[in-house]
């Protein structure tokens, strides 16, 4: 939680590296700068750490932590948001197409001003911050805790894809494991405290893996009075 709040506090500076437009602009200019590296790193992290970026480092997660007093209800999210997936897929295709049709490989220039400078270097870099925060607060207010993760985040489909792909091809990765099914007393604390509204208790009782929207935050590990859960690294059975 502390890391999320720190990440949110520097969001005015880092938003330029997480916004959808800067990577396209940078690649169009034939440059791989910090914005492109950031998005690519988040994607790659999904193979090894699954969605730990969402649970530990995402400024949007910190923003929703601040906004949760507006609506802290669990969000029953069963339907796939295909519209968001389509939009993000188009975004990724555009970035790849820009590189392919340019006819040359982009050069590495981390400090390129397209999105490589700190936002504080020019006041215009601050402008996306205010509507982004309002947007995130609005999703929490309308849908419940982590509502933006479920319904609005453009990073989610990218890291969810790499996370799912990593598990399918059996890449060793970080995950929350059940140490002992027998210790569970059905207190439901794990389900009540889960920020992603996962029915954790049901996963324990049916001996199923936690779903792909688990963000490896470790709240169920900390809150469980019987020490049922633990972080593990490897190929999940």
Image (cartoon, rainbow, N blue to C red):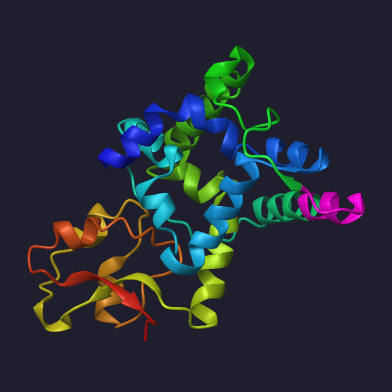
Q: Is residue 38 above or below residue 128?
A: below
User: Image check: 176 left or right of 118?
Assistant: left
Which quarter of the image is occupied by the C terminus? bottom left
Frontmost residue, 124 versus 27: 27
Q: Main secondary structure of the magenta part?
A: helix
Q: Which residues are magenta?
A: 95-106
Frontmost residue, 91 versus 16: 16
Residue under the image location 29 percent in, 83 percent down: 207
Q: Position of residue 39 (x, y in %)?
A: 59, 48
Frontmost residue, 50 versus 31: 31
Q: Is residue 76 above or below residue 111?
A: below
Residue under the image location 61 percent in, 15 percent down: 122
User: Image check: 73 left or right of 230?
Assistant: right
Q: Quadrant of residue 213?
A: bottom left
Q: Do we see residue 157 in this rendering? A: no
User: Image check: 52 left or right of 181?
Assistant: right
Q: Do we see residue 32 in this rendering? A: yes
Which quarter of the image is occupied by the N terminus? top left
Residue under the image location 77 percent in, 36 percent down: 25
Q: Is residue 53 above or below residue 23?
A: below
In the image, is residue 96 part of the stretch drawn in magenta?
yes
In the image, is residue 7 part of the stretch drawn in magenta?
no
């Amino acid at each position: 939680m502390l890391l999320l709040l720190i990440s949110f506090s520097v969001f005015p500076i880092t938003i330029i590296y997480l916004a959808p437009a800067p990577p396209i602009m940078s690649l169009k200019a034939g440059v791989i700068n910090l914005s492109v590296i950031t998005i690519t790193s988040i994607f790659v992290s999904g193979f090894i750490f699954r969605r730990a970026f969402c649970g530990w480092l995402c400024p949007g997660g910190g923003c929703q932590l601040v906004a949760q007093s507006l609506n802290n209800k669990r969000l029953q999210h069963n339907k796939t948001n295909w519209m968001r997936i389509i939009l993000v897929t188009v975004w990724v295709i555009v970035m790849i197409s820009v590189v392919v049709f340019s006819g040359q490989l982009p050069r590495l220039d981390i400090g390129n001003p397209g999105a490589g400078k700190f936002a504080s270097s020019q006041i215009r870099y601050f402008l996306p911050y205010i509507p982004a925060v309002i947007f995130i607060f609005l999703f929490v207010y309308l849908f419940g805790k982590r509502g933006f993760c479920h319904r609005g985040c453009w990073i989610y489909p990218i890291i969810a894809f790499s996370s799912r792909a990593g598990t399918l091809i059996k890449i060793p990765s970080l995950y929350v494991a059940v140490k002992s099914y027998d210790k569970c007393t059905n207190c439901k604390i794990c389900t009540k405290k889960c920020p992603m509204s996962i029915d954790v208790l049901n996963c324990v009782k049916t001996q199923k893996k936690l779903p792909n929207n688990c963000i490896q935050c470790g709240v169920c590990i900390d809150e469980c009075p019987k020490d049922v859960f633990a972080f593990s690294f490897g190929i999940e059975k």
